[in-house]
Amino acid sequence: MNAISRDSLLSLEAYARQRAAFRSRVIAHKKDRTLHLGEHITLMFEDELTIRYQIQEMLRIERTFEEEGIQGELDAYGPLVPDGSNWKATMMIEFPVETERRLWLTRLIGIEKHVWVRVAGCEPIFAIADEDLERDNGEKTSAVHFLRFELPPPAIRALHAGAALAIGVDHPAMTAVVEPVPDAIRQSLCGDLRA
């Protein structure tokens, strides 16, 4: 898989010139990497392009051009790029009304440990969540979690051979399953995995 190196990033000036086209490309790309689990959970499966965009946007917003700041963004976001044996996703818990969101975030403590992927013929693989830091405080969970799904070689081989994929969440307060995952998303995710 492609790692994002310092030398591969655009300067602020070059990015400003290419931003509109790059942003359009990323938005189109994300359509085949975004999965809604029910009405309130969205998984955005990250890859080299989505993370490259995130880094470039952070550098632009913060007007960062010094090496130390650039390296800081690479260090923060680089680990979110899958490495060939896993998928990495940003999970967003979405409730448009703030009072409802606060209520649900107290009900959904631990939800990040209840998200799974299942390749047909294989056991479910539960997410390894929030490796960067703890995202709940015992009273409520965060609206954003970072998930990693480590796929064993048999599951990867099965996916590359065309096996169906299901993704779900089985928290006591909220359950949802997408089965099968739409083929465009399944194919995009297969691109993250080394055969």
Image (cartoon, helix red, strand yellow):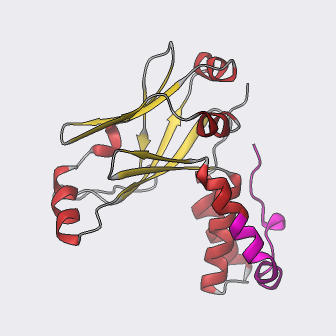
Instruction: State the quadrant of the C terminus.
Output: top right
Q: Residue 104 in the image: state x and y as whole percent.
A: 19, 56
In the rendered image, the quadrant that contains the N terminus is: top right
Name the residue nearer the viewer: 83 or 191.
191
Magenta segment includes 16? yes
- Residue 98 image position (x, y, % from top left): 23, 71
**Residue at the spot 34% in from the left edge and 45% down from the top edge:** 38
Q: Quadrant of residue 177?
A: top left
Q: Tell me: 138 left or right of 90.
A: left
Q: Is residue 73 magenta?
A: no
Q: Position of residue 120 (x, y in %)?
A: 51, 17
Q: Residue at x 66, y 82 (%)?
A: 60
The rendered magenta stretch, by its main secondary structure, is classed as helix
Q: Which residues are magenta?
A: 1-24
The answer to whether residue 63 is above or below residue 193 is below
Of 90 and 17, which appears nearest the observer? Answer: 17
